[in-house]
Image (spheres, rainbow, N blue to C red):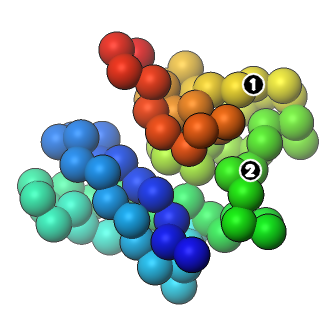
Amino acid sequence: MAIPVTCEACGKSLKVPDKLAGKKAKCPKCQEVIRIPGERKSGRIPSAAAGNDCPSCGRSLGAGDVFCVGCGYDLRTGKKVPGL
């Protein structure tokens, strides 16, 4: 299963192989370095119930958070919320 990632610099949506989980890579569009979220358990998007980091930007999330206020990543859908 591929990991969805969005480049913070140019907004390009990517799907990267699971073997790159937790690593950094360059965006193929703008060459900015992006962080690939860590491995997901059971192919599901991680919840913030245990105080996880945002899988998109790495910002620390609080228990019960459903989206990251830093980058707008929605943990329920695995996509960024437009306009945040």
- Mark 2: which secondary structure? loop
**Residue at 59% in and 38% down:** 77
Q: Residue 62's image quarter?
A: top right
Query: Label 1: few (<14), some or many (≥20) within 10 Å?
Result: some
Q: Residue furthest top?
A: 83
Number of residue marks: 2
User: Which amino acid, by three-letter code, is at mark 1?
Assistant: Asp
- Mark 1: which secondary structure? loop
Left or right of 75: which side holds 30? left
What residue does disc 2 label? 46
Can you say which quadrant of the picture contains the C terminus?
Answer: top left
What residue does disc 1 label? 65
Residue 26 locus on image (x, y percent):
24, 67
- Distance between the alpha carbons at the discs numbered 1 and 2: 11 Å
**Residue at 30% in and 41% down:** 8
Mark 1 and mark 2 lie on one chain; the one further toward the N terminus is 2
Residue 20 locus on image (x, y percent):
48, 78
Residue 47 locus on image (x, y percent):
78, 42
Residue 36 locus on image (x, y percent):
47, 63
